[in-house]
Image (tube, grey):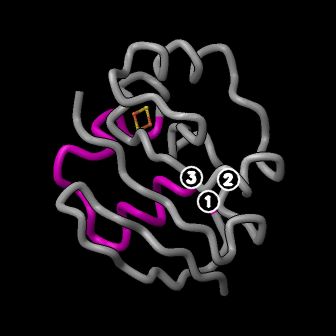
Amino acid sequence: MITFTLTDRDGKTHAIKTTPDGTLMEAIRDYGLTDEFALCGGHCSCATCHVIIDEAFLPRLSPVSRDEGGLLDGSDHRAAGSRLACQVPLDATLDLAHITVAPVD
Ligand code: FES
């Protein structure tokens, strides 16, 4: 099991304990955050799964792909820790991370 902290778009913080499997997007969606989140179902085409991950964790993650980067470039809320949660494998590298769901563009 891993645990990460998630701040939702209303500013509420949740401690999510989950099995390290699938993607970060799936873990957030399965936890119950579905309002205007992950609308394309993980096909890297909507950017509604935009999250901002603690910068300290970024070196542990796979690089941002061209498609992911292109979608993030279209966001007014892109930050140094921006990722599309559907493109981030959920594994032990995210244990104890703090993640914020980006506002809707
Ligand atoms: S779920 Fe649509 S881009 Fe990630």
Q: Which residue is most to the right?
A: 60
Which quadrant would the N terminus be assigned to in this image?
bottom right
- Find disc 3 in the rendering and name its residue: 53
Mark 1 in CB contact with mark 2 (< 8 angstroms): yes
- Mark 1 neighbour density, 10 Å: few (under 14) some (14–19) many (20 or more): some
Q: Is residue 28 above or below residue 50?
A: below
* Residue at horizontal 45 percent and vertical 46 percent from the top: 51
Q: Position of residue 97 (x, y in %)?
A: 62, 68
As for residue 35 lying within the magenta part, the answer is: yes
- Is tag 1's residue or tag 2's residue first in the polypeptide sequence? 1
Closer to viewer: mark 1 or mark 3: 3
- Mark 3 neighbour density, 10 Å: few (under 14) some (14–19) many (20 or more): many
* Residue at horizontal 67 percent and vertical 73 percent from the top: 20
Amino acid found under the numbered disc labelled 3: Ile
- Span colored in magenta: 22-42
C-alpha span from label 1 to label 2 = 6 Å
C-alpha span from label 1 to label 3 = 17 Å
Q: Residue 89: which disc?
A: 2
